[in-house]
Image (cartoon, coloured by chain):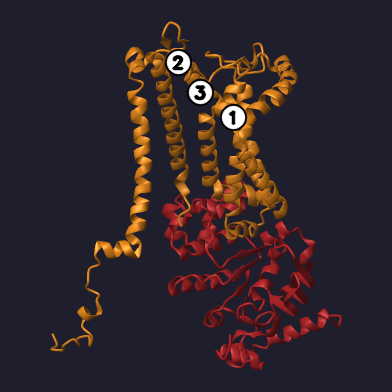
Chain colours: A orange, B red
């Protein structure tokens, strides 16, 4: 090795203050620590609130849990007078109305989003989007009223024809009273469509021009560009909008209870009245007499929580399996 | 503007194209014949009276400072500019002996392929990326697609690097590989012309060298027009170079001529780095 000596810096490190450790107080004063604490508190509060929620639902449903066990989930009897409670009609109603609502809302919402993002002139698109976002802010009781005064009278005219030609299919048969799973699903669909449109439009618009141009340069038509390049690129965001809608549909209370009929029964026919978890809790909570009744309602809340979790988990799983060729960065 | 005499333009350029005595190759026929071309973005005129011939199965490079119109001209060749609202074209471009604007744009773009500045693979597998253009044409059978994908990847000198991961995401390969994938994707539909818009500006020197090598191979079967900011690249890959300034074609000549003995003072200034 050579004997070369490295030159020492003319100003020693110590005098530049680089080696000084900042005290906690200094970091606090400069803002770093404040931001850290605020965001930390925000993050933890979510976990704490969720934890408390589950804990409360768990503790205050104990009588019902002890009385019925797992049987609670599959029992169709809801008889407050005799103190027999089963959640199945409500779980069934919740799941059926939500899934049917999405089946109706996804094509309409996605179609509208594609129109607004890809085809409509930007001014028209912005104006319509404003109106659509306004729809998302309408209170759900208004949607319930629309269901009762607008939708159900129309359905009374339409459903007989459907039943005449398709009545042989189990989901369409039976007497139609206006209030039904079907009516509730349509109202729910109308309520979630604005979410799907608004979010999907946003992600469709944000697909990079490079993707569109690359597709166009291959000789793709406008439709090919939209359907084979833009929509696949945006599919994660679109799925996100659908899951948000699903969560909304599962938990919707007011509008559903106004048009579903509030009958605790399980019917194959979508034309029959039914009930949902959120609706029964809202309707019966104030008049629940006796601890068991109250605990049964709270256990329903727990069940709704679990159902929502299951749907979210399934959604995540679906996303993961689709993630095969993910956009990274 | 004076009415434009196409025959004169052709002859002028033929002389130029033939001016290289070192080869006695056959004269290339004009792939594109551009006459009195003006292009407008709204009121801004991006191209001013461009006349030029792009010879078949040669590499032509467009150089010039940013905003000089070279990319605009490139994008006019496959009519990508039409997709931008408020643009307007005047003058004529002929593809071979046909009016460029007489074709449906979607069919034209299968004949005139394009590769962009930023590698833009679709968020799909490597195989699907190359097959994308093929699948747009329903007359191409499923069995042929796999063959054509392999063939295109080989032409883009990418096959050996990706043959074991054809069904992995195209986003997982390096930027240089992605750009060659985009070239393979453009080549898969067997275009007559390949337009390259600064294809190497986002790549490292090794990836750039690979793409330049590749262009030498492709030009046997394809006319290549490349826009580049890198004058060394133009000197390396191009047979002909056009120098643009402020929307005008200042000089068009053999690459050697442009870089060794340009006719115009502005060209001289640009290639010696006095401006731009």
Callout 1 secondary element: helix
Callout 3 secondary element: helix
Which chain hosts label 1? Answer: A
Callout 2 secondary element: loop
User: Mark 3 near mark 1, Cβ–Cβ under 8 Å?
Assistant: no
Q: Earlier in the sequence, mark 3 or mark 2?
A: 3
Asked if both marks, 3 and 2, belong to the same chain, the answer given is yes
Describe residue A217's horizontal placement relative to residue A301 as left or right.
right
- Of all residues, the one furthest to the right in this rendering is B3
Residue bearing mark 2: A288
Residue bearing mark 1: A101
Q: Residue A282: which disc?
A: 3
Q: Whole-Å distance between the Cαs marked 3 and 1?
A: 21 Å
Neighbour tally class for label 2: few under 14, some 14-19, many 20 plus, Cα within 10 Å = some
User: Mark 3 near mark 2, Cβ–Cβ under 8 Å?
Assistant: no
User: Mark 1 near mark 2, Cβ–Cβ under 8 Å?
Assistant: no
| Image location (x, y in percent) of residue A167 | 68, 14
Q: Whole-Å distance between the Cαs marked 3 and 2?
A: 11 Å
Q: Residue B135: which disc?
A: none
| Image location (x, y in percent) of residue B189 | 62, 57
Which chain hosts label 2? Answer: A
């Amino acid at each position: 090795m050579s004997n070369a000596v490295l030159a020492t810096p003319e100003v020693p490190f110590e005098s530049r203050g680089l080696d000084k450790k900042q005290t906690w107080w200094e970091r606090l004063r400069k803002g770093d620590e404040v931001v850290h604490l605020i965001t930390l508190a925000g993050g933890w509060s979510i976990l704490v609130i969720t934890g408390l929620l589950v804990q409360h639902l768990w503790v205050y449903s104990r009588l019902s849990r002890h009385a019925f066990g797992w049987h609670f989930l599959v029992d169709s009897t809801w008889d407050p007078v005799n103190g027999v409670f089963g959640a199945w009609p409500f779980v069934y109603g919740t799941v059926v109305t939500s899934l049917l609502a999405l089946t109706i809302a996804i094509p309409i919402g996605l179609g509208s989003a594609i129109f607004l993002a890809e085809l409509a002139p930007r001014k028209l698109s912005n104006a319509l989007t404003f109106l659509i976002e306004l729809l998302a802010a309408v209170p759900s009781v208004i949607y319930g009223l629309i269901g009762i005064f607008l939708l159900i009278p129309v359905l009374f005219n339409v459903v007989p024809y459907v039943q005449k030609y398709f009545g042989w299919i189990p989901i369409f048969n039976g007497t139609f009273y206006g209030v039904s799973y079907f009516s509730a699903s349509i109202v729910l669909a109308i309520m979630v469509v604005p979410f799907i449109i608004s979010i999907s439009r946003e992600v469709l618009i944000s697909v990079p021009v490079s993707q569109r141009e690359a597709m166009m340069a291959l000789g793709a038509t406008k439709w090919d560009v939209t359907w084979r390049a833009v929509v696949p690129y945006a599919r994660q965001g679109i799925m996100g909008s659908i899951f948000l809608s699903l969560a909304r549909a599962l938990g919707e209370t007011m509008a559903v209870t106004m048009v579903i009929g509030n009958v605790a029964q399980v019917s194959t026919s979508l034309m029959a009245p039914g009930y949902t978890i959120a609706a029964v809790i809202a309707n019966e909570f104030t008049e629940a007499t006796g601890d068991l009744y109250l605990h049964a309602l709270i256990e329903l809340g727990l069940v709704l929580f679990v159902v929502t979790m299951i749907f979210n988990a399934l959604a995540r799983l679906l996303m993961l399996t689709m993630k095969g060729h993910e956009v990274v960065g | 503007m004076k009415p434009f005499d196409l025959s004169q333009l052709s002859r002028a350029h033929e002389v130029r194209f033939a001016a290289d005595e070192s080869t006695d190759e056959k004269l290339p026929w004009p792939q594109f014949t551009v006459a009195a071309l003006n292009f407008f973005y709204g009121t801004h005129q991006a191209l001013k009276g461009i006349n030029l011939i792009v010879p078949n199965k040669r590499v032509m490079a467009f150089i010039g400072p940013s905003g000089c119109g070279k990319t605009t001209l490139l994008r006019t060749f496959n009519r990508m500019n039409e997709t931008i609202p408020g643009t307007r074209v005047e003058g004529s471009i002929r593809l071979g002996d046909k009016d460029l604007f007489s074709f449906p744009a979607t069919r034209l773009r299968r004949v005139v392929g394009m590769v962009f500045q930023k590698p833009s693979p679709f968020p799909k597998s490597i195989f699907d990326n190359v097959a994308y253009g093929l699948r747009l044409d329903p007359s191409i059978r499923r069995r042929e697609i796999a063959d054509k994908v392999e063939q295109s990847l080989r032409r883009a000198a990418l096959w050996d690097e990706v043959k074991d991961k054809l069904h992995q995401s195209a986003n997982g390969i390096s930027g240089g590989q992605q750009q060659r994938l985009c070239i393979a994707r453009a080549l898969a539909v067997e275009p007559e012309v390949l337009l390259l818009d600064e294809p190497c500006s986002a790549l490292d020197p090794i990836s750039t060298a690979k793409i330049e090598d590749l262009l030498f191979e492709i030009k046997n079967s394809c006319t290549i027009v490349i826009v580049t900011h890198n004058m060394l690249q133009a000197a390396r890959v191009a047979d002909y170079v056009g120098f643009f300034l402020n929307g005008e074609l200042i000089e068009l000549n053999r690459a050697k001529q442009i870089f060794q003995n340009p006719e115009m003072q502005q060209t001289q200034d640009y290639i010696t780095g006095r401006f731009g």
